[in-house]
């Protein structure tokens, strides 16, 4: 083995403390700074989207309320959904990927640092343009986050809101595609020797698969948006049935993107969970190959099921049956993953840190979301429940109970790497329980509301039995959640200044990012541990019992 | 529970890490070979991604035609023969570019320059042809807002033309750099990337031409 030698001269990481700091950040092409800026972008829009939904929940607190009125209500739910998906979850996951992937594969940078900056700024620009719509006399888009034609046509949405929607999403879409290109090439070309595809951390694998999904899905959305924009600006006829267009084609284009998008927002969280659970269970991940394989299977199936969002359109029984069956199939690889995580924990010595709390409850909440999803794949049930609050409940069990839980797990896990300090575990625990309570209170009840028949996207409702009570509780839950998020921000702010110093490897973890300093130096590593198994840092710390010696036999379940 | 898991940063582990870090391997940086591979991969995946964009537009066109019974004005207003000629020129331009790159491999940059110049000329003639067609259609009062045929036709061919135009800019940059002596062979990521992109634009046109003019 090569022995090492001279460390390179140490370039200090740009920080907020120098006099050129703002310029330094704006001009930065460092993947860690850009990753942090992605996260800050997401945070900015998370606050906006959160305020929007709190207003909505106030409106829904009692029957026959008139707090917002229908127009503003429509704008707020449209902006809420659009923001959370395109400007919160996408930047968060891409940001984590941009920050972590190079570190995890032992690289100094992304393959194209300047393209990386371009992606970030496109995303932010798109978001700002979308939000600029509030200032344009007519107000924000109000046709829902999927902007169904003909509602989104200039006849029914005569203000400029939907135009901002199109332009904003096209720009963030371009940002996402370029980020995905960068990730793919980085993972293909910058792995250090030894890090072949059998030894890639699960998170990197999932980002890799996700990047391919982005490359295929977002151009389809962009094509649809471009057509919608041409319809609105140049009086074309793509989506107006009266003059030869097709409103259903919009749905096809949107969901041919939209369904894969759901997995773009689910696979990276699967990766995060697969990093967090083993470390806090002190066991190697169970069934690595199955995790990867089922990830690929999910990605492939994702493109074949979009019409399950269109059962109510009336495409006919053969088509509905085919897509129902396809949708159920996705349950299989997803189920495999769930069992892998549970089996990873089984018999382990589990440390219930905040990160682990979120990861473990991710499994529960995400499964609930998955089950209500499968219930939608049953066509008759879908006919009954579509466009009710049952959908709202389902969406949120997937995106909050799934993606967001995983993001919180990941943030608690990697915060020490990013900042050099740990988040407060005490505040973290309170945050977790508050959030857990608020989340389930808000959305569990919405299943019931949906079954009782409360339609979504209607700004008020009559005083039917239980409607008032359930909505009231749902709003209380939402404010609990908001309070818990406030606590989380407080945790970040205080921990940044006086949190416990983390050291390079506070969790005694196994992947390469923990071999760099915390925070990592400008050029990540001068030298990295040799990679001869899935857990290079384990091998390093346990020369007497390294993984690669047991790779052929059953993986060791040591360190109990 | 807690005592069972002492601080992972215990002294024992720190010692072991210190010893272990002796076996770290250094990172190698800046391999020109690798950089070239990165650019070639980048353009490949970019083109793959773009093909999904065009696929959506083309499928939409077919959808209007099939499912929505688009009033098809192809036979009345489009001139498949003259566009067919310009199509042949575009195909030829892929050939001239291939010829140029082929000679770069043999380290004859002058021929690369000639190949590029020919490609640019042919591409420009193709765009000119499309301009003629557009002018003709506008005179016939076929516009984006006339009917669904106009919307679909101008959007699909317009986006293709935009890609040709971007290709011409790329080719011009490569030509200037070639004249300045930047590319001496045998390989160059810039030339390879531009070539792949141009072939892609060409193939997309063959599909669009078939879909719009022939069937
Ligand atoms: C405090 C937390 C949240 C509350 C109380 C909340 C509540 C709601 C409500 C009541 C709606 C229904 C609006 C309507 O369409 O009538 C909605 C829609 C939506 N929310 Fe949230 N939300 C929260 C956070 C999030 C987050 C974090 C995400 C994404 C990660 C998200 C994604 C969505 C989406 C995509 C929709 C649109 C659903 C649709 O109508 O198609 N929400 N939210
Ligand atoms: Cu779906």
Image (cartoon, grey):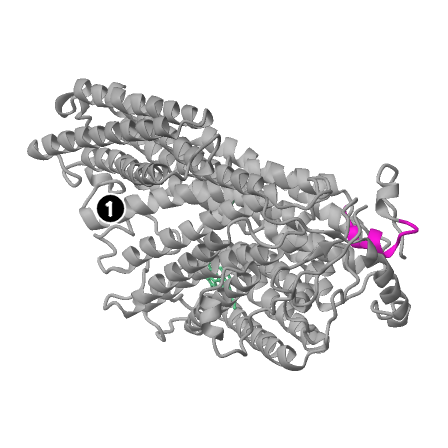
Image quarter hosting the N terminus of chain B? bottom right
In the image, is A128 to the left or to the right of A8? left
Please name whichever residue, A68 or A143, is drawn nearer the observer in this view of the structure.
A143
Q: Give coordinates of residue B25: x percent, y percent.
A: 75, 51
Q: What are the residue bounds of the magenta stretch?
A: A534-545
Q: Is residue A74 magenta?
A: no
Task: Classify mark 1: helix, strand or loop.
Answer: helix
Q: Is the residue marked by circle 1 packed among few (<14), some (14-19), or many (20+) residues within 10 Å? A: some
Residue A128's place in the image compared with A294, above or below, is below
| Residue at x 46%, y 42% (from the top left corner) | A217
Q: Position of residue B204 (x, y in %)?
A: 35, 29
Residue A11 in which image quadrant = bottom right
Measured as percent of width and height from the top left, residue A368 is found at: 63, 53
Read off the chain for label 1: A
User: Does the magenta segment cover residue A541?
Assistant: yes
**Label 1, on which residue?**
A230
Which one is nearer the viewer's eye here, A172 or A457?
Answer: A172
Residue A229 appears left or right of A375: left
């Amino acid at each position: 083995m090569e022995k090492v030698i001279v460390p390179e001269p140490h370039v200090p990481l740009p920080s907020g403390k120098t006099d050129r700091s703002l310029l330094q950040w704006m001009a930065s092409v460092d993947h860690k700074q850009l990753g942090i800026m992605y996260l800050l972008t997401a945070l900015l829009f998370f606050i906006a989207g959160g305020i929007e939904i709190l207003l909505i929940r106030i409106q829904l607190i009692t029957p026959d309320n008139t707090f917002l009125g229908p127009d503003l209500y429509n704008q707020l739910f449209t902006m809420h959904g659009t923001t959370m998906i395109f400007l919160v979850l996408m930047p968060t996951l891409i940001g984590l990927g941009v920050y972590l992937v190079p570190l995890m594969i032992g690289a100094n940078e992304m393959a194209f640092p300047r393209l990386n900056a371009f992606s970030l700024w496109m995303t932010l620009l798109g978001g700002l343009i979308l939000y600029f719509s509030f200032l344009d006399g007519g107000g924000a888009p109000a046709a829902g986050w999927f902007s169904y034609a003909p509602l989104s046509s200039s006849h029914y949405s005569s203000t400029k809101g939907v135009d901002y929607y199109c332009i904003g999403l096209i720009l963030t879409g371009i940002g996402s595609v370029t980020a995905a290109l960068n990730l793919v090439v980085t993972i293909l070309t910058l792995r250090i020797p030894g890090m072949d595809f059998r030894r890639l951390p699960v998170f990197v694998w999932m980002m890799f698969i996700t990047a391919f999904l982005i490359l295929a899905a977002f151009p389809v959305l962009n094509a649809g948006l471009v057509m919608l924009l041409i319809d609105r600006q140049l009086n074309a006829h793509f989506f107006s049935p009266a003059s030869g267009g097709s409103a259903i084609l919009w749905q096809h284009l949107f969901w041919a993107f939209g369904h894969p998008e759901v997995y773009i927002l689910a696979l990276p969280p699967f990766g995060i969970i697969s990093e967090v659970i083993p470390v806090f269970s002190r066991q190697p991940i169970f069934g690595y190959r199955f995790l990867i394989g089922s990830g690929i299977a999910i990605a492939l199936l994702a493109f074949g099921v979009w019409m399950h969002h269109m059962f109510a359109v009336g495409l006919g029984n053969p088509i509905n049956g085919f897509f129902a069956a396809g949708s159920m199939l996705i349950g299989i690889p997803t189920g495999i993953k769930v069992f892998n995580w549970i089996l990873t924990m089984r018999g382990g010595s589990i440390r219930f840190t905040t990160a682990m709390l979120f990861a473990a409850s991710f499994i529960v909440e995400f499964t609930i979301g998955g089950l209500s999803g499968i219930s939608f794949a049953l066509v008759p049930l879908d006919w009954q429940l579509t466009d009710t609050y049952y959908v709202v409940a389902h969406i949120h069990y997937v995106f909050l109970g799934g993606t967001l839980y995983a993001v919180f797990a990941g943030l608690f896990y990697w915060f020490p790497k990013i900042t050099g300090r740990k988040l407060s575990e005490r505040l973290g625990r309170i945050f977790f329980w508050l959030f857990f309570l608020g989340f389930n209170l808000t959305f569990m009840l919405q299943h019931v509301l949906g079954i009782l028949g409360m339609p979504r996207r209607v700004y008020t409702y009559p005083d039917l039995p239980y409607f008032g009570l359930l909505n009231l509780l749902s709003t209380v839950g939402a404010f609990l959640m908001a309070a818990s998020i406030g606590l989380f921000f407080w945790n970040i702010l205080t921990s940044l200044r006086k949190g416990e110093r983390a050291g390079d490897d506070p969790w005694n973890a196994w992947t390469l990012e923990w071999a760099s300093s915390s925070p990592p130096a400008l050029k990540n590593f001068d030298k990295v541990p040799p990679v001869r198994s899935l857990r290079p840092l384990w091998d390093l710390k346990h020369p007497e019992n390294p993984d690669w010696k047991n790779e052929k036999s059953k993986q060791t379940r040591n360190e109990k | 529970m807690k005592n069972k898991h002492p601080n992972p940063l215990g002294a024992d582990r720190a010692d072991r890490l210190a010893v272990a870090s002796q076996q770290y391997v250094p990172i190698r940086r800046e391999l020109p070979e690798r950089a070239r591979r990165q650019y070639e991969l980048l353009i490949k995946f970019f083109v793959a991604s773009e093909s999904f964009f065009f696929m959506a537009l083309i499928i939409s066109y077919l959808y209007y035609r099939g499912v929505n019974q688009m009033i098809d004005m192809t036979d009345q207003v489009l001139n498949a023969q003259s566009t067919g000629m310009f199509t042949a020129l575009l195909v030829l331009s892929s050939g001239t570019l291939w010829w140029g790159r082929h000679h770069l491999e043999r380290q004859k940059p002058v021929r690369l320059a000639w190949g590029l110049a020919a490609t640019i000329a042919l591409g420009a003639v193709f765009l000119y042809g499309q301009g003629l067609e557009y002018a003709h259609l506008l005179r016939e009062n076929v516009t984006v807002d006339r009917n669904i045929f106009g919307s679909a036709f101008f959007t699909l061919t317009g986006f293709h033309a935009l890609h040709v135009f971007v290709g011409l800019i790329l080719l011009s940059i490569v030509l200037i750099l070639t004249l300045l002596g930047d590319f001496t062979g045998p390989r160059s990521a810039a030339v390879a990337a531009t070539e792949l992109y141009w072939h892609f634009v060409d193939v997309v046109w063959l599909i669009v031409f078939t879909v719009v003019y022939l069937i």
